[in-house]
Amino acid sequence: MFYRENGQFKTSYRADQQIFPILQDRVAIGLLIAAAFLVVPFLASDYVFRAILIPFLIMALAALGVNILVGYCGQISLGSGAFMAVGAYGAYNFFVRIPGMPLIPALILGGLCATVFGILFGLPSLRVKGLYLAVATLAAQFFSDWMFLRIKWFTNDSPSGSISVNDLQVFGLSIDSAIGKYWFCLGMLVVIALLAKNLVRGAIGREWMAIRDMDVAAAVIGIRPMYAKLSAFAVSSFIVGVAGGLWAFIYLGAWEPAAFSVDVSFRLLFMVIIGGLGSIMGGFFGAAFIVVLPIFLNQFLPALFAMFGVNISTAGVSHAELMIFGALIVWFLIVEPHGLAKLWSIGKQKMRLWPFPH
């Protein structure tokens, strides 16, 4: 009953087309962002920042980029880990080779490198689709693994192949602390998420969804499949590349090519599927499920077994965690194939009608 639209009249096109047309949504999102910036830093510990919140924010950003390509444009990709790697190594080379290069421009330039890489490996989407496109994008993963492992220039001639960054600053302020990294990742996520939300609501977003639903019919009504597909690859690769730079610079600090293996690509695809295809909110739900749930199970399972007098080893906890995690993924796909974002949408719709039955 508190979530109703009665009396909220729109008197202009601008008011009707705003991101959150319902007042309750605007208030809720504003309070959520304010709490994330102002309340969470004073309640969370360093462990929560470094182990949960920072990887959640970065993976949510990466899932948002993958969702634009897979969810909105319908182009299946298994090369997201490669795009993250290109963004990370591109940002690293700009950061260390150009004296005085600020962090944010380095991350943006790394995202642009990932954009070029994504367009290059998105060219097969003009001729193939479905499983064949997934295999074509998987080639990007294998190529990036070889490139960053064998070509020493990308790692600044590091003999071990491992590289690191330190003394990170934004506008002259150090972000080496856990709170500083959290604020920086949160700010990047909020800005890019709002830009992506506006993008998918515009003309280009409608073109992506038309290509996803039926590309032949979209071409008949005047939509250019080449422009729509490659633009989706470009935007998605840019966002994923920026997320890769954040993952390397902010979360890892020191990394090697194995940090962006094919496992990362599959995790991002699972985030999108579980969170909800074609939904900006789905990226947040999927990232929370993939990042937070294993940590919760790792802490909860030993206590649960101890209640029944069973001592379980660390390896046993790890195996049980994988089994429960996989079973939950299958259960979610069976119960709600449209993802957690669909459950959120249904809940909002119920709140609009409650307590009335009609």
Image (spheres, rainbow, N blue to C red):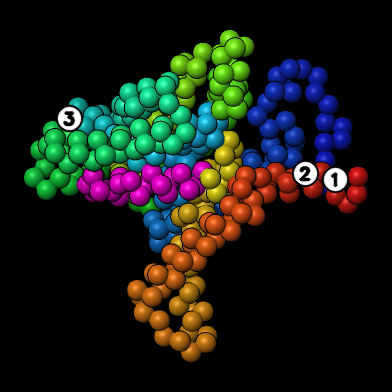
| Above or below, comparing residue 149 to residue 325 in the picture | above
| Rendered residue at 80%/23% (across/down) | 10
Residue 312 image point, x, y percent: 40, 81
Give left or right: position of 338 versus 244.
Answer: right
Q: Are marks 3 and 1 in contact (CB under 8 Å)?
A: no
State the image quarter where residue 209 is shown: top right
Q: Which badge, 3 or 2, is on the more N-terminal residue?
A: 3
**Label 1 Cα neighbours within 10 Å, binned few <14 / some 14-19 / many ≥20:** some
| Above or below, comparing residue 213 to residue 11 in the picture | below
Residue 343 image point, x, y percent: 68, 49
State the image quarter where residue 294 is shown: bottom left
Label 3 belongs to which residue? 97
User: Mark 2 is on which residue type?
Assistant: Gln
Q: Secondary structure at mark 2?
A: helix
Q: Are marks 1 and 2 in contact (CB under 8 Å)?
A: yes
| Rendered residue at 67%/47% (across/down) | 344
Q: Quadrant of the C terminus?
A: top right
Q: Which residues are magenta?
A: 252-272
Q: Nearer the viewer, residue 53 or 211?
A: 211
Residue 137 image point, x, y percent: 36, 34
User: Mark 3 is on which residue type?
Assistant: Arg
Give left or right: position of 73 versus 317.
Answer: right
Label 2 belongs to which residue? 349
Label 1 belongs to which residue? 353
Q: Nearer the viewer, residue 172 or 281?
A: 281
Give left or right: position of 344 versus 146.
Answer: right
Give left or right: position of 255 versus 275.
Answer: left
Q: Secondary structure at mark 3?
A: helix
